Amino acid sequence: MQAKLHSFITRILGAAFLIMSLQSCTRIELPGPTRFQTGEASWYGNKFHGKTTSSQEIFNMYELTAAHLTLPFNTLVMVTNLDNGKSVIVRINDRGPFVKDRIIDLSYAAAKLLDMINTGVAPVQIDVLNRVC
């Protein structure tokens, strides 16, 4: 059942990405020559649920969102857990992580789909998917 839900969510977000990418906007680039980044991901949930994010949204730990230090708000990224190959598409809506050597903080929902709730951290690859206007 969880695999079907993951597949459904990935397809829906993929369709949203396709629609957004058809707009004429500026391409977002990560530092360096590529559009991907690898490193450690962590997740945040209950402690911040209902609080205001850096983008002035209310954080909902059950939405597929994430915090990144430099990517613009509303950037869509695919995060792949390098330990198990599971992927999820999230929208950047906050700043962080503020822990050394971590590259992204995921919402509880995203971390659950990546199967990293118990470990708390996981090695990931981040791929920038969309263009931000």
Image (cartoon, helix red, strand yellow):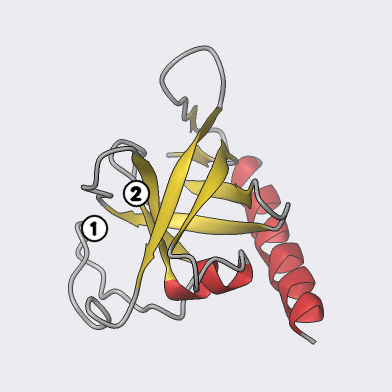
Residue 55: image tag:
1
Which percent across, then down, holds residue 111? 51, 67
Front position in the image: 94 or 56: 94
Give coordinates of residue 128: x percent, y percent: 55, 38
Q: Amino acid at mark 1?
A: Ser
> Does residue 10 lie above or below 76 as drawn?
below
Q: Residues within 10 Å of mark 2 (few under 14, many from 20)?
A: some
Relative to 81, is 115 above or below? below
* CA distance for labels 2 and 1: 7 Å
The amino acid type found where label 2 is placed reads Phe
Q: Residue at x 45, y 81 (%)?
A: 62
Mark on residue 93? none
Of residue 51 and residue 110, the one placed in the foreground of this image is 110
Secondary element type, mark 2: loop
Mark with earlier residue (2, 1): 1
Q: Are marks 2 and 1 in contact (CB under 8 Å)?
A: yes
Tell me residue 99's x, y (percent): 24, 47
Q: Secondary structure at mark 1?
A: loop
The image quadrant where one finds the C terminus is top left
Q: Give residue 101's quadrant in the image.
A: top left
Which labelled disc corresponds to residue 73?
2
Q: Quadrant of residue 5?
A: bottom right
